Structures are given as C-alpha cells and as structure tokens.
Image (spheres, rainbow, N blue to C red):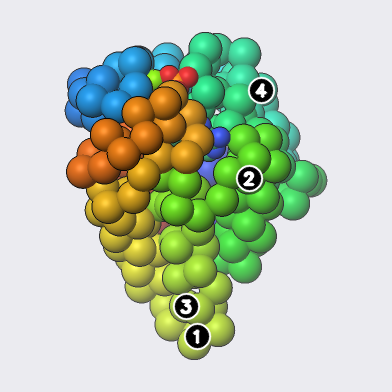
C-alpha cells in the first residue's frame, strides 16, 4: 500500500479535526500536572498546518511535512510546538522529493521524528513525555514490517502500542517538561503529550482503514 501526497494532506486535515475534538481533554490532562494549555496549543498548531498545506499540489511529501513542521514551530507557544515541529521537519528529510510513501517510509519518518524529539528535548523513554507513546509505536511498526503482516494490522498494533505507552505514563514520575517540577506528585497522572501522539497515530490508522 502506497500513500500519495494528496492523501497525506487529507490525513493532516483529519489529525487537525481529531485534535480539535480532543482539545478540552488534552488541556485537562495538562492542567493536572502542567499549565493546562496542551489542547489549545495542539489545536492552534494543527490549524496552522492545515492552512499552510491546503493548496499544496501534493507532489513532494517531504515538502508538505517541512511546511507542517514550520507551522507548528512558529504557531505553538508551548514546549510541544518546537518538539512536534522538529519531529515533522526531521520526518520530512527522510521522504524529500517523494510523491508517495509506503510503510517502510513511514517507519523511517517516525524513526527520524522520534530522534528529533529526543535531540531537541533531551529526553528518553520513561521521562513521561510523548516519547513514551511514540517509541513503543515505532517498535511495533518495525516488528510488524519484519513479520510481514498487512499494513492495516501494522498501524492498528502501532496505535495500540502508543495507547499502552500512554497508560504507562500514569505509573512514572515526570523527568522532563513542566510536570517534572512536581516530581513524585506527577505519579498517577497521564501525560498530555503522549496522549496527543497516540491520537495522531490513531488518526493515521483510521484514515487508512
Ligand atoms: P508546555 O509544557 O510548554 O505548556 P504543552 O503543554 O503544549 O507545552 O506540552 C506539554 C507536553 O510536551 C508534555 O505533556 C510532554 O509530553 C511534552 N514534553 C515536554 N517536555 C518534553 C521534552 N523535553 N521531551 C519530550 N516531550 C516533552
Ligand atoms: Mg502546557
């Protein structure tokens, strides 16, 4: 299964809608251990993404993702803007000039995105961040590719792995971001950024289903 540039634009529009639907929920999660703006940040950021790419011809998926990353960096005030922005810009480089991508490209994109987030935020697994959703999803995708299962099944397993990672964030102490100021008091709370990452991965699965 290959995805054309126009489909990538459609998926980004769906992500924007889904993030908007979950705006209050994401901000509520952030309010418990942060400053309560994650939903607003993400919704504003992805609206800017949609605005920036809506007239794109779809011929260069790298270009679409680069524009998306730039829109996120320049329109989101919080920590998540530069982090998601870097993720999209790093993913862009791996598919530069391509008019279609397959599951192997997607694994490469997510790999680069994750490296970008880790580099930019100096974080790692178990810091109670978006990394805790993305890393298990990527691992699951790589395993799915190796075992030769269908793309739909790979993406289903990936979003499930991401949500499992989200659940795990309740059991760990925040070591990065605003929630880290709370130390042990961050225990029992779900990370907002991990949740938005899982929502994005779920939307990709749904859009290709
Ligand atoms: P802010 O914390 O500036 O208010 P947001 O509320 O939009 O920004 O985003 C908070 C989310 O960003 C957290 O839930 C966490 O997942 C993620 N985050 C914060 N710092 C880092 C970091 N250093 N590395 C990875 N993710 C991080
Ligand atoms: Mg916040």
Quarter of the image for residue 121 reads top right
Q: Residue at x 59, y 62 (%)?
A: 107
Q: Residue 128, how many percent across, how many down?
A: 41, 44
The number of discs equals 4
**For marks 2 and 3 on the same chain, the one whose residue lies earlier in the sequence:** 2
Q: Report the residue marked by disc 3.
A: 144
Which SS class for mark 2? Answer: helix
Quarter of the image for residue 22 reads top left
Q: Report the residue marked by disc 1.
A: 148
The residues tagged by marks 4 and 3 sit, at their Cα atoms, a distance apart of 31 Å
- Give the numbered dot on residue 118: 2
Q: Are marks 4 and 3 in contact (CB under 8 Å)?
A: no
Decide if ligand 1 comes within 8 Å of the CB at mark 2. Answer: yes
Circle 1 packing at 10 Å, graded few (<14), some (14-19), many (20+), is: few
**For marks 4 and 3 on the same chain, the one whose residue lies earlier in the sequence:** 4
Q: Report the residue marked by disc 4.
A: 70
The residues tagged by marks 4 and 1 sit, at their Cα atoms, a distance apart of 35 Å
Q: Are marks 2 and 1 in contact (CB under 8 Å)?
A: no
State whether residue 57 appears in this view: no
Quarter of the image for residue 150 reads bottom left
Instruction: Nearest to the eye among marks 1 and 3: give it.
Output: 3
Image quadrant where one finds the C terminus? bottom left
Vertical order, 134 against 48 (above or below): below
The residues tagged by marks 2 and 3 sit, at their Cα atoms, a distance apart of 23 Å
**For marks 4 and 2 on the same chain, the one whose residue lies earlier in the sequence:** 4
Which SS class for mark 1? Answer: loop
Q: Residue at x 43, y 32 (%)?
A: 180
Vertical order, 196 against 17 (above or below): below
Q: Residue at x 67, y 50 (%)?
A: 115
Q: Are marks 4 and 2 in contact (CB under 8 Å)?
A: no
Instruction: Nearest to the eye among marks 2 and 1: give it.
Output: 2
């Amino acid at each position: 299964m290959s995805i054309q540039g126009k489909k990538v634009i459609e998926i980004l529009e769906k992500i924007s809608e889904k993030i908007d639907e979950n705006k209050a929920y994401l901000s509520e999660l952030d309010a418990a251990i942060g400053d309560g703006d994650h939903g607003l940040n993400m919704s504003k950021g992805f609206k800017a993404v949609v605005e920036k790419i809506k007239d794109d011809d779809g011929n260069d998926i790298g270009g679409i993702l680069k524009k998306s990353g730039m829109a996120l960096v320049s329109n989101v005030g919080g920590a998540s803007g530069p982090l998601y922005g870097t993720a999209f810009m790093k993913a862009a480089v791996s598919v530069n000039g391509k008019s279609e991508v397959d599951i192997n490209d997607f694994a490469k994109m997510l790999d680069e995105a994750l490296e970008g987030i880790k580099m930019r935020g100096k974080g790692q697994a178990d810091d109670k961040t978006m990394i805790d959703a993305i890393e298990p999803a990527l691992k699951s995708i790589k395993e799915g590719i190796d075992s030769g299962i269908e793309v739909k099944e790979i993406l289903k397993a990936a979003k499930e792995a991401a949500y499992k990672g989200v659940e795990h964030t309740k059991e760990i102490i925040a070591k990065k971001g605003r929630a880290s100021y709370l130390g042990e008091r961050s225990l029992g709370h779900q990370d907002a950024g991990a949740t938005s990452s899982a929502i994005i991965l779920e939307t990709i699965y749904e859009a290709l289903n």
